[in-house]
Image (spheres, helix red, strand yellow):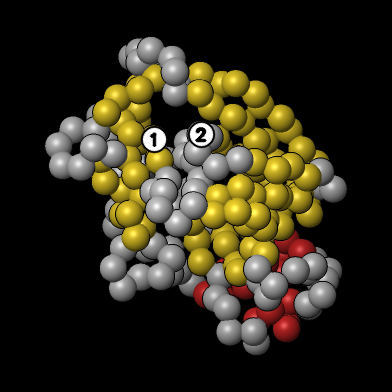
């Protein structure tokens, strides 16, 4: 168990994911995620993505909607995305650059459809497999505790970008106001202990 003050002095620094939520690595291998309206976002939404790992997540505060997506649908005018992959950005530990899935040139185009969509309140948990597209959206200030259970180090996660738009590779999750980020963490947890 760790208090906010212990987390601040632990040496880990919160960062902002381009999809608008805060990430904080916790001692013991867990990660705190916080959604809050004060956090910046990248210019182009890339909410639909998959992972290279199996994860478990518990909602600590607020409400989270977890939506599983299939890319088997035919692309249409309002339902078309380019498929990109997240490549590590050299010299930046937590950042990635989105590049077309097939290398240089135009990305492969897919349509998507919702498979399931579940709203979860504080106390709810779920486990999610790698290689499956999904989104997570929060209602108001929401905090979750996430743990990676398995990892495929050779897999580059897929990220869908709305057709006709370019991914915002200029967004730097490390270069945000650290004071604001710690305030978001403190407000989300309201002084409660964090379990890692």
Q: Are marks 1 and 2 in contact (CB under 8 Å)?
A: yes
Q: Is residue 45 above or below residue 176?
A: above
Mark 1 element type: strand
Q: Could you tell me residue 135's position as x and y percent?
A: 55, 37
Give the residue drawn at x 61%, y 40%. Answer: 129
Mark 2, residue position: 133
Q: Is residue 60 above or below residue 63?
A: below
Mark 1, residue position: 160
Q: Residues within 10 Å of mark 2 (few under 14, many from 20)?
A: many
Give the residue drawn at x 41%, y 49%. Answer: 155
Q: Could you tell me residue 74's position as x and y percent?
A: 38, 12
Give the image quarter of residue 29.
Answer: bottom right
- Between residue 133 and residue 2, name the one nearer to us: 133
Label total for image: 2
Q: How far apart are the two marked residues, 1 and 2, measured between alpha carbons?
A: 9 Å
Give the image quarter of residue 184.
Answer: bottom right
For the C terminus, which image quadrant? bottom right
Give the residue drawn at x 60%, y 54%. Answer: 150
Residue 74 showing in the rendered view: yes
Q: Could you tell me residue 24's position as x and y percent?
A: 60, 67
């Amino acid at each position: 168990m760790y208090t906010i003050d212990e987390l601040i002095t632990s040496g880990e620094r919160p960062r902002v994911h381009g999809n608008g939520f805060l990430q904080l690595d916790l001692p013991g291998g867990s990660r705190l995620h916080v959604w809050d309206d004060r956090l910046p976002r990248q210019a182009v939404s890339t909410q639909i993505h998959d992972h290279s790992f199996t994860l478990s997540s518990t909602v600590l505060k607020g409400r989270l909607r977890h939506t599983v997506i299939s890319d088997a649908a035919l692309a249409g005018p309002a339902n078309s995305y380019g498929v990109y992959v997240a490549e590590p950005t050299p010299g930046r530990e937590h950042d990635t650059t989105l590049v077309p899935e097939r290398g240089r040139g135009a990305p492969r185009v897919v349509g998507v459809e919702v498979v399931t969509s579940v709203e979860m309140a504080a106390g709810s948990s779920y486990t999610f497999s790698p290689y499956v597209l999904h989104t997570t959206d929060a209602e108001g200030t929401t905090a979750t505790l996430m743990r990676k259970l398995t990892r495929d180090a050779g897999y580059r996660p897929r990220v869908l970008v709305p057709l006709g738009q370019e991914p915002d590779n200029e967004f730097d999750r490390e270069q945000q106001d650290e004071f604001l980020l710690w305030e978001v963490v403190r407000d989300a947890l309201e002084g409660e202990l964090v379990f890692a």
